[in-house]
Image (spheres, rainbow, N blue to C red):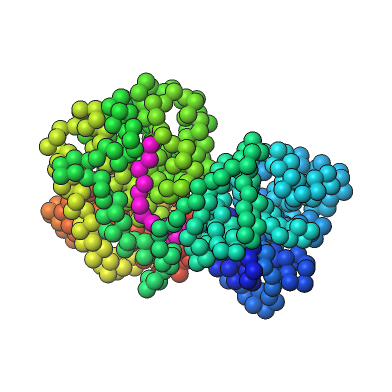
Amino acid sequence: MCGIVGAIAERQISAILIEGLKRLEYRGYDSAGVAVFTDNQQLQRCRRIGKVAELEQALTAAPLVGRLGIAHTRWATHGAPTEANAHPHFSANDLAVVHNGIIENHEELRARLQGLGYVFSSQTDTETIVHLLHHLQKTHADLGDALKAAVQQLHGAYGLAVISAKQPDRILAARSGSPLVIGLGIGENFLASDPLALRQVTDRFIYLEEGDIAEIRRDSLQIWDQAGQPVQRETVHYKESAEAAEKGAYRHFMLKEIHEQPKVVQRTLEDRLAADHVLIQAFGPQAAELFSQVRNVQIVACGTSYHAGMVARYWLESLTGIPCQVEVASEFRYRKVAVQPGSLFVSISQSGETADTLAALRNAKDSGYLASLAICNVGTSSLVRESDLTLLTRAGPEIGVASTKAFTTQLVGLLLLTLALGRARGTLDAAVEAQAVQALRGLPNLLEQALGMDRQIEKVAELFAEKHHTLFLGRGEQYPVAMEGALKLKEISYIHAEAYPAGELKHGPLALVDSDMPVVTVAPNNELLEKLKSNLQEVRARGGQLIVFADEEARMENGEGTLVVNMPHAHELLAPILYTLPLQLLSYHVAVLKGTDVDQPRNLAKSVTVE
Ligand code: F6R
């Protein structure tokens, strides 16, 4: 959830570090800092509370000029967001560390190190690492050896980088549970927690694996695996263009990412559809054989990705007859699960680094599942690397903290999975699959039409700007869509939003409805439409203001207290994907009206790599 950047070069590296931090700021942004081994042979640092821009300003006023440095943008876990808690942390002014993750035994380490005379200047778990390293250097003269000894004593998750004033020709790095990537240059090398941070300096990367330690010099690199053996890791060429991480003409990343959806959905479908069926091989070479044995599906994910899983349950059970359970990863990982024979474990994640989802996958490996499948946006992520099968969602980098294009491409991936499983099991009617494939081909165009409603939705947003509470209603597979709409609104506008299955209204939440409580509903033209209309009457009768996103064929009309926004008619299977877009746009415009920080809402981080 925090971000790390490091650089060793012949040129000045401060600007590279700052640019890298800006690109990582979406991961954590309550404080930031940089440590540089300066040209006058001193290890110096600058740290600031708030965004990277604050740090940049401070460095403009008092530059740190040097060719070796590490930097960090923080999302506080241990200790409040203060300057003292910001990374890099120092020991004895000659050792600096930046760290992502959590050291679980930090209290015990802190007590031991204090006993040895170390004085702590922060409340962080990270500071224990730097003092431990300093202490170990007394018996391990080489920094690499000291780091190898130190990681033996660390419990928890870390991606960390170290520099030393005594050995200023290298950056040391270690990974366990928190991703790190080395960026390869010519006569210079870099390190980051996400390649996005280094796209302005290189397109060649080496991903560290779990337990790896790396020593990065200006023109050489050495990696040791978990067992301490030297290893070679593959160099990957990054194909995504650097512009993918830039806002372009859009005011916010979120808006840009909402508008990218037709394009990225198109990309997610590419080479995965034959004329009338889904290509099962898209899930991996063993998918056909494994899918034919699937009797049950267990989906695990967090947040928005969990909502995608909830939609998939409706698709899977209704189209293929395969039972499906969906659970949030933070619960699933600590539960003793009764696994049915022939169960496929499916994890869904934008980042592929979410700690709870990864832990759930790791637990699942020993629990008797038939196989694991990751539906993920990051091909090099831990989740993908540790799963048997993968479907990449190809949404491209998602920078806005509120997930948008990642969600709709996950839904596309899950619909492909439904069709592939149904065919492999022989439980899906071929004509139904052919119709679904045909409909999927038209999806980008349908999404384009929904985006055309942007101005209309901007006006609707005005109804919300002064409100404090809202309800979102949906039925069937639109219930998780309503949940996703509510999550978007609360995340970025800070308006309290709750989602209910419309039929539950009179079992409690109806008591909340009055003229101050807008009620948002998604109403595609399906067999539940008539029931939904009666639920809406219940709201109107209590003076509630209704905002209904309705299929143009549903014949719902504007009236007093009822605002109907007509949606293009869509195949029933596509409705959850289509109806997500107006809800995203609504949240976006409400947040803009309220003046909140759309791309980096308070208290949140893009990728939750700690528990
Ligand atoms: C909400 C949001 C989060 C993530 C969740 C899981 O807009 O982005 O709820 O969906 O933290 O993240 P991933 O999908 O990376 O596992």
Q: Position of residue 563 (x, y in %)?
A: 23, 61
Instruction: Give the quarter of the image for residue 295.
Output: top left
Looking at this rendering, what residue extends furthest in the bottom direction? Answer: 61
Task: Identify the residue shown where x is 15% and y is 32%.
Answer: 429
The foreground one among 597 and 175 is 175
Task: Identify the residue shown where x is 31% and y is 63%.
Answer: 259
Q: Is residue 315 left or right of residue 307?
A: left
The foreground one among 167 and 51 is 167
Q: Is residue 321 left or right of residue 42?
A: left
Magenta stretch contains residue 391: yes
**Where, quadrant-wise, is the C terminus in this rendering?**
top right
Task: Identify the residue shown where x is 87% and y is 48%.
Answer: 117
Looking at this rendering, what residue extends furthest in the top direction? Answer: 341
Q: Position of residue 1 (x, y in %)?
A: 55, 52
Q: Is residue 99 visible?
A: no
Q: Is residue 97 visible?
A: yes
| Predominant SS of the magenta segment | loop
Q: Position of residue 473 (x, y in %)?
A: 30, 48
Q: Where 536 falls versus 422 (above or below)?
A: below
Residue span colored magenta: 389-401
Instruction: Give the quarter of the image for residue 149.
Output: top right
Q: Is residue 479 left or right of residue 211?
A: left
Q: Position of residue 405 (x, y in %)?
A: 35, 55
